[in-house]
Image (cartoon, grey):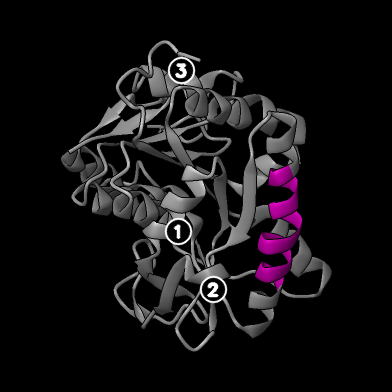
Amino acid sequence: MAVTGLEGFAGRWFVVKVGGELAQDRAQLAASVGAAVRAFLDAGVRVAVVHGAGPQASELSKRLGLEPKMVGGRRMTDAATLEVMKMTLAGQVSVDVASAFRLAGVPALCTTGVSAGLVEATRRPPRPITGAGPEAVDMGLVGDVVAVRTDLFERLAASGLVPVLASLAADASGNVFNINADTVAARLAADLHAAKLFLVSNVPGVLRDKDAPSTRMPRLSRADAAAAIASGIIVGGMIVKVEESLAMLEQGIDAIHIVGVEPPDTLLEEARSPGSRGTVLVH
C-alpha cells in the first residue's frame, strides 16, 4: 500500500529509538510509534527499533534499595544496576513494546544486542562526560558499540520482521554491558546507512526552554547544536541525544529527528515533513 509522503524511501532503513517512558502506556505507544512503523513498512521501508528503560530501571532500583546514579544524563552501572537493567530492558519493557506493536499490527521480534552478537560492545574506559566537568569518569559496566551484525538485520527485514533491540550488548567473552539506547540507535542507523533516525520520547524536540514546548527548534545544524550545548540551552539527557546524533551524521545517516508522540500522528508527519513536528538535525 502506498503511503503518501514516503515515496523514495522504499528499500531504505529507518531506525526508531523509543524512550522507556513511552512503554508505560501501551495504547499510546501503539497509536503513535506503532502506527508510524506500520505505515513505514507499508511504504516499503525497512525498520529497526531500539528501546530504553530509564524510568522502569530507576523505579526498580529504588524498590530494591539502590539509588540510581546519573552523570551528564547517563546512568552509572555497577553489578547490581546491571541486573536491574537486564530485568527492565530485556524483560518488562521488551514485552510491553512487543505487546504495543502487536496491537498496531507490527511484526516485531524483540530481543537484545546480546542475541546472536547483533551488537558487539567493549567496556567503556574512563573519560570526561559532557556536563560533568573535566575529570575522567568511570561509568562502570557501560559499553561502547564496536560492531553491528548488519547482515542479520538485513535477513530479519527480508523475512518481514521488525527487529526491536533492548540496549544491552556483550563482548566476545560474553560480558554484558548496559549502553545508552540513543548510542545503540545512532550506531545501528550509521551502520545500516539509514535514511532516517528517529529519537522518540515524551519531549517534542530540542527546546530553547525545556519547560516550554512552544520553543521547539525545528532544525539544527552541527554548529547550532554545539552552540546550544555550550550556552546551556541543551541540558541533561538531551545532550546525550544530540551529541550521539551529530557524531553519526558523518557516517551515512541522511537526517536525525528528535520527536515526541503527541498528537499520535506526530512521528509519521515528522517523517513526511522534517522539522514540522520535531527537531531535525542535519549536516
Circle 1: element type: helix
Q: Where 84 falls versus 195 (above or below)?
A: below
Question: Does the residue at mark 1 contact the one at mark 3 (Cβ under 8 Å)?
Answer: no
Residue 86 image point, x, y percent:
68, 70
Q: Which residue is mark 3?
A: 269
Above or below, 98 relative to 120: above
User: Residue 225 vs residue 163: left or right?
Assistant: left
In the image, residue 39 sits, relative to residue 205, either above or below, namely above
Quarter placement of the C terminus: top left
Q: Is residue 277 visible?
A: no
Inspect the image, locate mark 1, and give the three-letter code of the amino acid beneath it: Leu
Assess disc 3: are there few (<14), some (14-19) or many (≥20) residues with their C-alpha within 10 Å of its C-alpha.
Answer: some
- Rendering quarter of residue 198: top left
Q: Which mark is residue 76?
A: 2
Amino acid type, callout 3: Glu
Residue 152: image tag: 1
* Segment tinted magenta in the rendering: 84-98
Name the residue furthest front. Answer: 159
Q: Residue at x 57, y 76 (%)?
A: 77
Say left or right for 59 vs 119.
right
Q: Secondary structure at mark 3?
A: helix
